[in-house]
Structure formats: structure tokens, C-alpha cells
Amino acid sequence: MSAETAQHPGAARVGIGGPVGSGKTALLEQLIPRFAVRGTRLAVITNDLVTKEDAERLRRSGLIAPERVLAVEAGACPHTVIREDPTLNLDAADLLEQRFSPLDLILLESGGDNLASTFSLELVDYWLFVIDVAGGGDIPRKKGPGVVQADLLIINKPDLAPHVGVDLEAMVAEARAVRGDRLVLVTNCRSGEGVDAVVAAIGRDVLFDAAS
Amino acid sequence: MLKFDTILGLAGDPALHERLHGLEHRGAVETIVLEPRDMARHRLRATTDKGTDCAIALARDTMLEDGAVLLLDEARAIVVRSAVQRWLALVPRDAAAALELGYHAGNLHWRVHFEGARLMVALEGPEAAYLERVAAFLEDGRVRRADG
């Protein structure tokens, strides 16, 4: 008696959280074409406070079929719809799976929030938290739940470090210290540098690549 | 890598227990130990105590449980076990301190339950990180620790 089967188990659901302006949408714009190249069947959900700004940006980008992008308006603190009551996002994810089955991956971008923001594991299988160098080199040692508990912490905008007086090496070291074994990656989501490693991490941990 | 998308049953189920018991005697039961909060995941990659790489992708309406059996054949079994939940037990000095502590724990989104006068906080990271957040309460005696 074995549970191994060849059935499609439904899409992996991966959350992307982080403070306002840290680069969550820019990361999405870098991830989408990379997953397309891999042949990953993808859809996206964006969360905004009271608009559909991020969804419209992605729909206009030409990176993904516009109908594969759904918007959720939190209407309140963004973490409420990714943690306390993720019903709106669960419904959106289920709708995308119905419309575009089979999907391999749904990326859920949270609205910009604070360092305490986390995702419900009822909603996502794996989640990323994006902070940026310009937000301050001291962010990791503040040990916000987002920074500490995310499956993958991304430090974005490393090119800005010399301009904002941040010691990038120390920031990365402190992030690794507060996260224990959990992964920390540095990306430049304008140039795309470092994003391949994000794709590899998602590929390994929830798309189940044999080796990445 | 072994892929699993269903749970065959629980280790304590009469239908499975005897076969598992036999495999245990042959050292052929592998265990995946997950932190309590990771038991909520539907999809994850994990390694058994014997080093087998496992990819678990369950339907959205299926939940992992302590004792979930992922594989059971003549040669071996793979069973998921939840690590023991660690708790921090806090006792407020009086009603005012209890109100403050409850408000504080809510603000921090801690997972808690109540045992009489004790607030039990589920530890999902190092205990020291939690103690830092209530240091002021402990220092001035509004709250004290109790044995878990």
C-alpha cells in the first residue's frame, strides 16, 4: 500500500510579504518570466489596501496573461487577509485553480505591511518576506515575526547600501543570526541579480525539483 | 525523492497498527518530525530520520496529524510525528496585570491558551525571544513564570 500517485495535487501557494516599498511587486515581475521559462503554470493574486494598483501593474506588464492575475482589496490592515481571516485570498486561489487548472504555482503578494506581518499556513505552503536595505540595516535585529518566521527572507536593493549608510554584509549576517537555519537571500529586483536563487528555493521546497 | 499526496491513516488505526508494529521490529519505520506549526502545512519537503527525501502535497481539505502514515508497504513505512509543543507559562499578579498581559500577547499575535490563572504561550521560536517581549512585566513583578 503506497500513497505515491501521479495525480496533480493542485497548485503550490507561495506568499510574498514585506513592508511598503521593499520590492514585492518588483520581485514578482522578476519571478514571473523565470517561472514561465521553466514551464511552470502560474497565476498571481495581489493584495492592496483599497485599490487594485499592483494587479493592474502586473496585468499591463505583458509578463503574464491579465486574466491570470486577481486582486484582493484588504480594506484594512493587509495582514488581516493573509493571516487572521484569509477567506478572500483562499477564494481567489480556488477560483484561479478552477479557471486555469492545472496550475503549478500561485504567487500571493501581500499588501505592504509592518515587520510583524506573517502568513497563515492555511493559506500558503511557503512564504517569503522582502525587506530592503534602504529601510534600515537594523531591520533584522529587530526580530520582527516576518523577518524571523518566513521560510525565505529576501534582502533587496543591495546597490543602495553605500548611499544609505548600511553595512550590507553586517545586515545579512544579522539576518542569518536571528533566523537560525532558515534561508536568507540577497536580490536586486531591478537588475534581476539573485532572483534565480529565489526560483531555485521555491522550486526545491514546494515545486519539488529533484535538485536545485 | 518520494512524493505523497494522501494520508493512508493514523498509526493508531487498528487496520494499520499491526503492520506498523511488525515493521518497527525490523527497524523499517521511518519518521518525519515536524514542528507543531508546520503541521498546518499542506505542501512541504521533509527528510525522514533515516534520510529519505519526501515531498508532501496534500489536498487543501486534508490536514497532517500526529501519526499520519504516508507510506506502508512490505518493506517500510513512513510516519509523520509532531514535535512536542513547548509552552511558556505566565502568571499575572492581579487582574490589572492580567489585562495588560492579555492585551500585550494579543498585540504580538501569540498563540495562547488558558490554564486557570496561567496564560500558556505556544513557543514557535527560541524561548528567549518571548521572554524579551515580557521582560518589563517580569522585572517589576506584574507577571511571573510558572513551571510549564
Image (spheres, coloured by chain):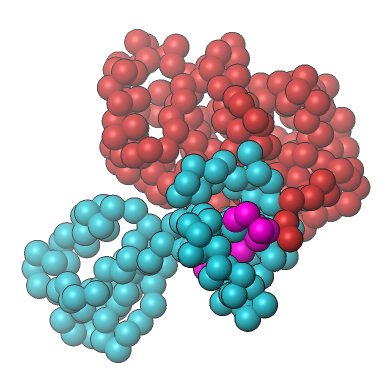
Q: x and y percent of residue A50 in the render?
A: 67, 48
Seen at 72% across and 56% down, the residue is A2
Q: Is residue B127 left or right of residue A18?
A: left
Q: Quadrant of the C terminus of chain B?
A: bottom left
Residue extending farthest right: A99
Q: Residue furthest bottom?
A: B116
Q: Is residue A154 left or right of residue B4?
A: left
Q: Is residue B41 magenta?
A: no
Q: Quadrant of residue B71?
A: bottom right
Pinpoint residue A11: horizontal percent, then vertical percent.
Answer: 76, 45
Chain drawn cyan in the picture: B
Q: Quadrant of the N terminus of chain B?
A: top right
- Which residue ends up furthest to the left in the rendered image? B140
Which region shows up in magenta? B64-76
Q: Does A168 sit above or below residue B87?
A: above
Q: Where is residue A91, by image quadrant?
A: bottom right
Give the image location of residue B88, x and y in percent. 27, 68
**Residue at the (66%, 44%) spot, across then down:** B2
Viewer-closest of A186 and B41: B41
Confirm whether residue A120 shows in the render.
no
At 44% from the left and 11% from the top, the residue drawn is A159
User: What color was chain A assigned in the picture?
Assistant: red
Q: Main secondary structure of the magenta part?
A: loop
Residue depicted at x 10% and y 72%: B141
Left of B33 or right of it: where is A162? left
